[in-house]
Amino acid sequence: MLVQQLVNGLVVGSVYALFAVGYTLVFGVLDILNLAHAAIFMVAAFTTYALVSVGVPLWLAFIGGCALAGVVGIALDRVAFAPLRKRNAGTLIPLISSIGVSIIIGAIARGIWGIDEKHFPVALGDAPPIHLGGITVTAVELVTFGAAIALMLGLSYVLRATALGRNIRAVAEDRIAAVLLGVDLEKTIVMTFFIASALGGAAGILTGLQYNSVTVDMGAGIELKGLAVIILGGMGSITGAVVGGFILGAVETLSVAYISSNWRDAIAFGVMFLILVVRPRGLFGKRALRAA
Amino acid sequence: MISFFTSHSKLFDQLAINALLALSLSVCLQAGQLALAQAAFMGIAAYISAILATQAGLPLVPCIVLGALGSTLAAMLLALPVRGLRGVFLAIATIGFGEILRIVANNLHITGGGEGLSQIPADANTFAIYGALIVVGLGLFGLSKTKFALAIALTREDETAARGVGVDTAGVRFWTLALGGTIAGIAGVLYAHSNFFITPADFGFGRMEQILVACVIGGSTSAVGAVVGSIVLTLLPETIRFLADYREVTNGAILLAVVLFAPQGIAGLWQRERRK
């Protein structure tokens, strides 16, 4: 029973981690809270759904959904954040403009796809579940977990071993020093938005597949939970977001199993509040609390 | 003209309640606190007054007093643990506080769970609502003439410098959060007593976003801005009905346009014109 719950927690947690990694990457590089991340999560799920509906194979539709999410992320930066960067608008104003963009994205999605719940025409959920020593895992859970882990490993490789990754880390560490050392700031930021949004989009597609349900407001729940995850892990820390995502997934499934599903989300936010009060830099945040 | 007002009285009531909510956040923003629990304070007071009115038959005025007292106490209790947090960290902690309360209201018996409470007497008429707005407005205007207002502005602009010249910045932060709780509570009671029923979803993050947006598009550091922002945000969807299908897109676009092109908000634009 306990092991089965922990396995379920790993699957749920992998999606939280994937979503939160994109959230925290943007925060780490730009110090802004991007409240349109959940809207991009939803757009990617719808794009993949639309592609699969017209007969595109699932793997290709997945890539298509992530790519479009990445492009929407770049557009978001160009429209809502880049102009504000030029005039040093602080943290509140970009937060508001990201709310504006998320309203626009939501309205467009509603216009195109309507408010009804959509289901994937592919029968991924029909594959027989796998039994392993008393533990049951469905095919869709296995795909979700595998894809999420692969994408996070990919990000880790990009950040550690490529020129782009070095630039992103340099800008996150100290923007002015990075520019002085010849890093192309705007190009790095654009690529950061592409990667962060594509990962957030992947989380949306996996969520849609897992529950075989895509709705316009599917991002509402994860938007605030993603905040809980990045606070738990430490704002701006990729490792923290991954660990935080898995912890939240485990805590949630355990609280559903042993306490009550009604209180599940209260526990997530309770933990977040406690961490902020007791240890605002979270588990892995290196930076001290700043007046950001 | 009169028939226009009577046929739209619901809208005008809503307008004043939104203005009160924006004022409650504006008080916190003026002290540089991005505290986003106003919807929760509103909800606390709304539930207190709904329970008092339906179960003890209390009239509107004592409901307002007790509801606002409850939300003020809640704000003070919240202010203590978050006193060390700034910027987005304060924002996230207060969002978390609001979400916890929403979930609690969703699960308690006394709050009616997810279905909320109904049959709240609709005794908050337009006069009562605008009366409350005028009282709060005059109170804030009076406050703006005191030394405390200067301490608030100093705390916002530079906390260290403010401390350096002897401002009790911790006190400023505590009392502005408490005052924000009071005003949001008054708005919450009026909301409950003009809507017949309330549910936890009325006081969630969506409501908080609306309040924040109203404050910022009006001008985040002035009370006038908060009121202007609420007027724009409440009336905009009504006046651009002819764009029906594009209404939400237009709302988002206007919000973006204000943020990008009018950094001081709509009220700021007017002040800039006046200074020329």
Image (cartoon, grey):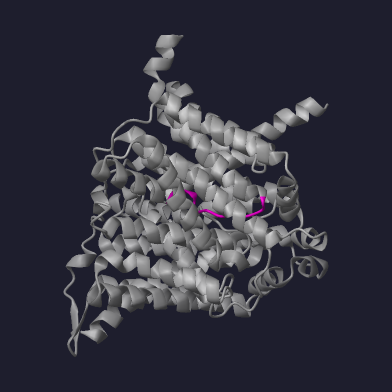
Q: Is residue A228 above or below residue B203?
A: below
Q: Number of callouts in the render?
A: 0
Q: Is residue A134 left or right of residue A22?
A: left
Q: Which residues are magenta?
A: B31-40
Image spot of residue B215 (x, y percent): 58, 41
Q: Is residue B233 visible?
A: no
Is A207 displayed left or right of A153 in the figure?
Answer: left
Foreground residue among B205 and B136: B136
Is residue B265 placed above or below B117 in the rendered structure? above
* Residue B197 location, quadrant: top left
Residue shown at 27% from the left, 70% from the top: A140
- Which part of the image, by quadrant, shows the C terminus of chain A? bottom right
Relative horizontal placement of residue A23, taking residue A3 as reference (left or right) = right
Kindly identify the residue that appears in the image at 26 percent across and 86 percent down. Answer: A3
Q: Is residue B6 left or right of residue B166?
A: left
Between residues A283 and B53, which one lies in front from this camera angle?
A: B53
Q: Position of residue B254 (x, y in %)?
A: 56, 34
Is residue B36 shown in magenta? Answer: yes
Magenta stretch prevailing secondary structure = loop
Confirm whether residue A133 shows in the render.
yes
Where is residue B107? Give x, y as percent: 27, 59
Magenta-colored stretch includes residue B80: no
**Which part of the image, by quadrant, shows the N terminus of chain A?**
bottom left
Residue drawn where x is 68% and y is 68% of the image: A290
Q: Quadrant of residue A15?
A: bottom left
Considering depth in this image, is B91 or B72 the residue closer to the camera?
B72
Q: Position of residue B230 (x, y in %)?
A: 53, 34
